[in-house]
Amino acid sequence: MFKMTHNILRNLVVRKSTRRYPFEVREAFDKVRGELVNDIVRCIFCGSCEVRCPSQCIQVDRKAAVWNYDPFACVFCGVCVDICPAKSLSQKTQYLRSVDKRILISMQGELKKKSREKDKEAEKDKPAPVEPEGPAATG
Amino acid sequence: MRKTVIPFGPQHPVLPEPIHLKLTLVDERVVEAIPNLGYVHRGLERLADVRDFHQMIQVVERVCGICSMIHAHCYCMGIEELMAVEVPPRAQFLRVIWSEVHRIQSHLLWLGLFADSFGFESLFMQFWRIREKIMDISESTTGNRVIVSVNVIGGVRRDLSAEQTRWLLTELDWVEEQIQRLQTTMMEDYTVKKRTVGKGVLTAQQAYELGAVGPVARGSGLSQDTRQTSYAAYGELYFEPVVETEGDCYARSKVRFREALASVDLIRRALDKLPAGEVRAKVKSLKPPKGETVMRVEQPRGELLYYFKGSGEKNLDRLRIRTPTFANIPPLLAMLPGVYLSDVPVVTLSIDPCISCTER
Amino acid sequence: MREEITPVRPADLIGEVAKLKIQGYRLVTLSCTEIDANCIDVLYHFDKDLGLKHLRLTAMKAEPVPSISPVYFAALLIENEIQDFFGLKFQGLVVDFQGMLYLEEEALKTPFCKFSIQTAEKTSAPSIAHAEPAEPPAAAMPGEPAPGEMDS
């Protein structure tokens, strides 16, 4: 027990190692794999995320241009972000907040071959997605 | 002499995960122990039938939460051997670095839990405070705290920048200093020694015959570490297994403590030698794995073995996972006879039981 | 596989394994694969000085295989696991859990087989299991090792 005393005495004078969490939040690291977002305007509904997802939480309807996503089945591995050919998928650095109701995300997009103006209009309404990593780093 | 049969577990304050031991006692001493498993069996091996070999990486990472990186590392090495993929040297080094980060966090977790098992709560908190820094290292370099998901067939998904390498080195200095500060408490404290020295002795002969692996074997004086086979980049790093000879709970905790410090050194050397270049080989044009192979790596708990059998399809025919705790249960049964009932929690925890691993 | 695999017949198995034990090999594990409806493949992995050695036993599902647990005590859990998941019977197990190490008494199919064989001959009848659902499977375990066997 006495061998521990010097540690205890030191802990009385050094800074606390815990945070008062909801009031003090540590800044997220910039490579963190958090919430998955789809920039539906850029999505080409190829379905490769659906094929490669290990937890099968994404369903893509190629004909109706609907992207369905179940964040509660998602394991946030980021495989879909890596392989997305249109780079429409990205991950925020914040984790998904805990909620008391199940969320199912369903996004209606448009199939390609649309005018440039429409593209810009839609982009104005949406906040720009945070890119957690450059594509060059992942090869 | 009257015999008493006492069930130990599946729910017990000292056990993080459910395992049942049927203990036969004479007075206060254990004379026989019989295990019973099956409380957390998930059938992950069979998932290879429905998930293709790329998706299985995320599945095998979830075999064990604590050593997810090393499971995925072993799996990827096996598939790479079957598909004849050449992994870039930088990726090999990065895999070693993250594996060792995981080893430190696993050993610190265990040292904390072990201190808790004999009631030394403040030591438990000190170890877990250091572990939090390791978790930060994981999170900032790989993207996640525990299930890091950096391995892919052919390499790794993340790279370390020069800035991160410098940051990592300063953080490692802090971690090493903090671990060393607890050395006198863990190794020389009267109360710690009273609860661990001479408890659950496993001789080297017993350990070898019963197939003990990892720190349990090395605590009994066997110099047996799968990292000696120089998989990944271990061949290029100077590496020596940590061995203690007493074979009791104290020796096993000493092995893990020294290994945590040795891992810090290994990461430093790996960062120093880290070659430049690609981190991921192209595998898209290659055929799915065909043939069978066995791959072994060293987990924090010991030797991990994967057996692969593929027939050139997207799904593997058979994936067999032998986790270290599964091999360490027979040695545990040999350690228990002769110990007091009050020491059973300490002895059980000294093999670092990971039951979800064991039952997969 | 990089290492050689020696095929063995069920009759020679114990002899081969005992020979390896005398040579100082450590039992790593057994891996079991289903080949077809009748055949099952058991690989025995051994290690000595970081080198692996494998034995391959191709067995019929219906016929029991000799257990190596009297030679290597460590094989006890692995063989019981195979018995649970593949329905392959082992003769002379040190502790025989009767297919109830992982599974419950109600489970009559072998979960890791594509061509499952019905293992209806579990010790306790299903009706008893329903009458006492709280009883753990360990209580139904008949064979317990003699104290001397634990030391080997």
Image: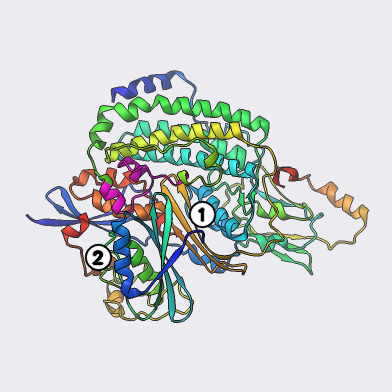
At 44% from the left and 47% from the top, the residue drawn is B226
Q: Answer whether residue A54 is visible to the viewer in this image.
A: no
- Quadrant of the image occupied by residue B14: top left
**Residue topped by disc 2:** C94
Kind of element beneath mark 1 = loop
**Residue topped by disc 1:** B62
Which of the two marks, 1 or 2, is nearer to us in this view?
2
At 81% from the left and 54% from the top, the residue drawn is A42
What's the distance in space between the residues labelled 1 and 2, CA to CA?
A: 32 Å
Kind of element beneath mark 2 = loop
> Which residue type does callout 2 highlight?
Val
At 55% from the left and 28% from the top, the residue drawn is B171
Left or right: residue B211 compared with residue B320: left
Say which quadrant the C terminus of chain C sits in: bottom left
At 63% from the left and 64% from the top, the residue drawn is B288
- The chain containing the residue under callout 1 comes to B
Check residue B225 for magenta coloring: yes
How far from the left and from the top, in percent, is residue B336?
A: 23, 49
How far from the left and from the top, in percent, is residue B268?
A: 54, 31
B155 versus C55 height, above or below: above
Check residue B148 for magenta coloring: no
Q: How many numbered marks are there? A: 2
Stretch of the chain drawn in magenta: B205-227
Q: Which mark is drawn over residue A20?
A: none
